[in-house]
Amino acid sequence: MRKVLSIIGSRMVQLVIMVLILSFVTFLLMKLTPGDPIRTILKVDDVIATTAEEERLMKEYGFDQPVLVQYSRWIWSVAQFDLGESIIAKRPVLDMILSRLPATIALSIGGLIVLFLISVPLGTLGAVYEDRWPDYLSRWIAMVGASIPSFWLGLLLIYFFSLQLNLLPVMGKGTLAHFVLPSITLGVAMAPMYIRLLRERLISTLQSSYIEAAKARGLLKSRILLFHALRGSLIPLVTMFGLSIGSLLGGITVIEILFSWPGMGELIVNAVMQRDYPVIQGYILIVGFLVVITNLIVDLLYLVINPQIKQGKELV
């Protein structure tokens, strides 16, 4: 329990530091980015001189204040769980993000299920049958998967399964069938590095001394593989997932746009195009929060996968 509380406390400190650094950098970059949100609101051309209406809106949104003053006001609002109001939609940013967050999380879970179903069997086959045809097949699949951009794979899946075979819907969200193509696209795009990592780790684990000791005790090969070798080999995969969660959330935006998935991807793309600063800042802050929380879950999973960590022992 002490180890768990220590991990949680450490991550909470990281969360506070991350919010301060990320929010300030994001806020500063938004101010340096070309474009004028006020002109976007008024839908006027850049060549038109500043009008009284523009000046009124500048004052209303506080854009006439120094950057540090604007930031201090915004971070104080964030501390009160208020991410501000969208300049374009005139809605609370937090409500806009929370209304789309479940769809993004659902798609992420679908992609992770596909990732697990692909990488664990293929990585295990490659290790168990090292330098034989199952190993060659798993490495070939990993190589091909790593060579295909996710958006192109998504287009291929749409062409064959939706347009040609008419088996699955092309876009939108509603039934379980709508999850299939975007989940496969996301999972297949991430699977190659996990296949290679699991294969290499499992090969090393199967040659270790404690696996030889398990064989000497007469344990079944399937039990040794599932409960000893594979369990110990999952730690690098969990670590990799914690490190790549940012890339996952970035890549899912492309897939959401491709399949018209009503997640946060469409929200952030529209916000960037319209220079909707409060939405962009709120989105980046929420994504940063999700990264820290995911890494906290990863740290806690270590205690489940390898109980030795509870006693503070080094991983073998």
Image (cartoon, grey):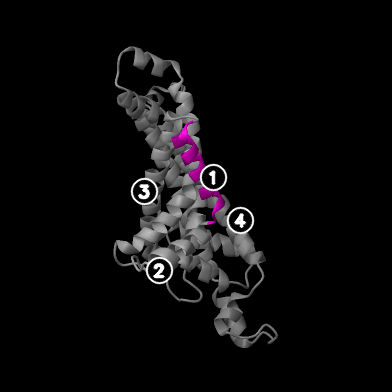
Residue identifier under label 4 = 25
> Is the stretch drawn in magenta largely helix, strand or loop?
helix
Identified at 51% across, 46% down, the residue is 244
Q: Residue type at mark 1?
A: Met
Q: Residues within 10 Å of mark 2 (few under 14, many from 20)?
A: few
Separation of marks 3 and 4 at Cα, in angstroms: 34 Å
Circles 4 and 1, Cβ within 8 Å, touching? The answer is no
Please tell me which residue lies in front, 301 or 132. 132
Q: Earlier in the sequence, mark 2 or mark 3?
A: 3
Find residue 165 and report its image quarter. Answer: bottom left
**Residue with the mark numbered 2:** 164
In which quadrant is the N terminus drawn?
Answer: top left
Nearer to me, 228 or 104 = 228
Label 3's element?
A: helix
Q: Position of residue 189 (x, y in %)?
A: 49, 51
Residue 185, percent across and down?
44, 56
| Position in image of residue 154 (x %, y %) | 47, 61
- What separation in Å lies between label 2 and label 3 (alpha carbons)? 26 Å
Q: Which of pointers 4 and 1 indicates the residue nearer the eye?
A: 1
Identify the magenta region.
Answer: 132-149
Residue farthest along the front direction in this orientation: 133
Q: Is residue 42 magenta?
A: no
For the residues bearing labels 1 and 3, Cβ distance under 8 angstroms: no
Residue picked out by circle 3:
113
User: Circle 1 sits on which residue?
Assistant: 143
Residue at image location 47% in from the left, 62% down from the top: 156
Kind of residue indicated by mark 3 = Ile
